[in-house]
Amino acid sequence: MATEELPPYPQMILRAIEALNSDNGSNKSTISKYIESTYENLPTGHSSLLTLHLNMMKASGELVFWKNNYMKRDPSAAPRRGRGRPPKPKEQREPPIAAKAVKMKVSSGTGKPRGRPRKLPQSVTTTALPPPSGRPRGRPPKVKALLTEVSVL
């Protein structure tokens, strides 16, 4: 089938998988070899184009990738699950603007604000303290013993 114009890559890939007709599907290298032997004048970036289109077809659901092989999706077969726990379904949320309008401030009933009180500036705290008493704060320093001279006999 040597023609001037090549069919689109998804069509060439599907023809290759059908022609190879393997129960487990066909891997990328066998699909590439079949396309290279069947079609002439392939572009220079054939392997990267093939990889790109295989990934696009896998993402869209046209092909199933299982154990390093690509196969056509069977419409009657149940979808295969991957390893691990499936993700939770995403729920639709209301816009946040409506939630802000409805939200009301709840008071504790005591009249006091919640949490630790704010720290006052230094100028206010120094004037509010009572004058210090005669004793200094903290532990008193050790008293050094006086040394006396000892006479030698």
Image (spheres, grey):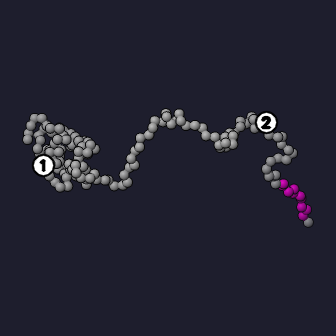
Callout 2 amino acid: Thr
Q: Position of residue 149 (x, y in %)?
A: 89, 59
Question: 97 and 141: which one is in front?
Answer: 97
| Viewer-closest of 112 and 85 | 112
Mark 1: few, some, or many residues within 10 Å (few <14, many ≥20)?
Answer: few
User: Does the magenta run of residues contain 87?
Assistant: no
Is residue 151 shown above or below 101?
below
Image: 120 above or below 148: above
The answer to whether residue 51 shows anywhere in this view is no
Residue 93: image x %, image y %?
44, 40
Under mark 1, the amino acid is: Ala
Is 153 placed left or right of 78 in the picture?
Answer: right
Which residue of the protein is positioned furthest toward the bottom in this rendering? 153
Cα–Cα gap, marks 1 and 2: 95 Å
Q: Residue at x 40, y 49 (%)?
A: 88
| Mark 2: few/some/many CA within 10 Å (<14, 14-19, 20+) | few
Of the residues under marks 1 and 2, which one precedes in the sequence? 1
Task: Please give the label number shown on residue 127.
Answer: 2
Residue that carries the numbered disc 1 in the rendered image:
19
Secondary structure of the residue carrying numbered label 1: helix
Quadrant the N terminus occupies = top left
Q: With 124 as the anchor, is 23 left or right in this view?
A: left
Front-most of residues 107 and 11 = 107
The residue located at (53%, 36%) in the rendering is 102
Magenta range: 143-152
